[in-house]
Image (cartoon, rainbow, N blue to C red):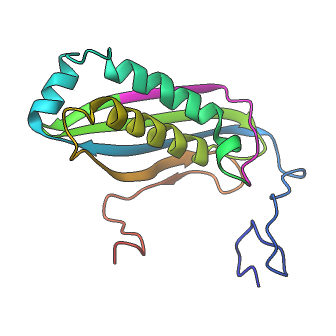
Amino acid sequence: MSQGLTHFDEHGASRMVDVGDKAVTQRVARAEGLVRMLPETLQRLRNRGFAKGDVLEVARLAGIMGAKRTADLIPLCHPLPLDSVTIGFEFPDDQTLRIEARVAVTAKTGVEMEALTAVSVAALTVYDMCKAVDRGLKLDAIQLVEKTGGRSGRWTRDANETSAAQT
């Protein structure tokens, strides 16, 4: 019944994956996401022109905190002693903020969910702090970019790859 899904047993019951026999290795995951907004909003964000404070620094801290709390938010995630979490920002055009999270751990399981949570929480924080001036903010394209370590080794998103949801 589980059809290869590791979070379900042979009867379809939810379970936390047993990682007891896995090797402890260095594991890294990178995720990204976009926040789309009006050009005036992005300019204000870049110039740190919000009365609430430096939106990007608050979002960076929120993303780091989110990564650390992933196991509290995603029911079957293992709590992990993270080695590092970094959040970066880029501006690919005049309406887009790109957020990237890099999370590392030395453990028996990976940190993909922590990287995705970090990006999501950082993006939600930008939304929360900017919504008063731009109700049309849009969170977009939150996705895993790369993961390394563990039994499956390295995986990188191919630029030409499309997910089943996109086809």
Q: Quadrant of residue 5?
A: bottom right
Residue drawn 83% across and 74% down?
9
Where is residue 30? Give x, y as percent. Answer: 49, 41
Position of residue 93 relative to residue 152, above or below, is: above
Position of residue 87 relative to residue 100, above or below, is: above
Residue drawn 68% across and 29% down?
82
Position of residue 46 relative to residue 147, above or below, is: above
Question: Which quarter of the rendering shows the C terminus?
Answer: bottom left
Position of residue 78 relative to residue 5, above or below, is: above
Q: Residue furthest front?
A: 132
Residue 81 is covered by the magenta coloring = yes
Where is residue 160? Give x, y as percent. Answer: 31, 64
Q: Nearer the viewer, residue 32 or 63?
A: 63
Residue drawn 44% across and 24% down?
60
Q: Nearer the viewer, residue 42 or 151?
A: 42
Specify whether 129 is left or right of 60: left
Q: Residue furthest bottom?
A: 1
- What number of labels is visible? 0
Q: Residue furthest right?
A: 20
Specify whether 68 is left or right of 100: right
Q: Nearer the viewer, residue 129 or 33?
A: 129
Q: Main secondary structure of the magenta part?
A: loop
Q: Quadrant of residue 127?
A: top left
Where is residue 156? Give x, y as percent. Answer: 46, 53
Question: Which quarter of the rendering shows the N terminus?
Answer: bottom right
Where is residue 10? Give x, y as percent. Answer: 84, 80
- The part of the chain drawn in magenta is 76-88
Residue drawn 54% across and 27% down?
64
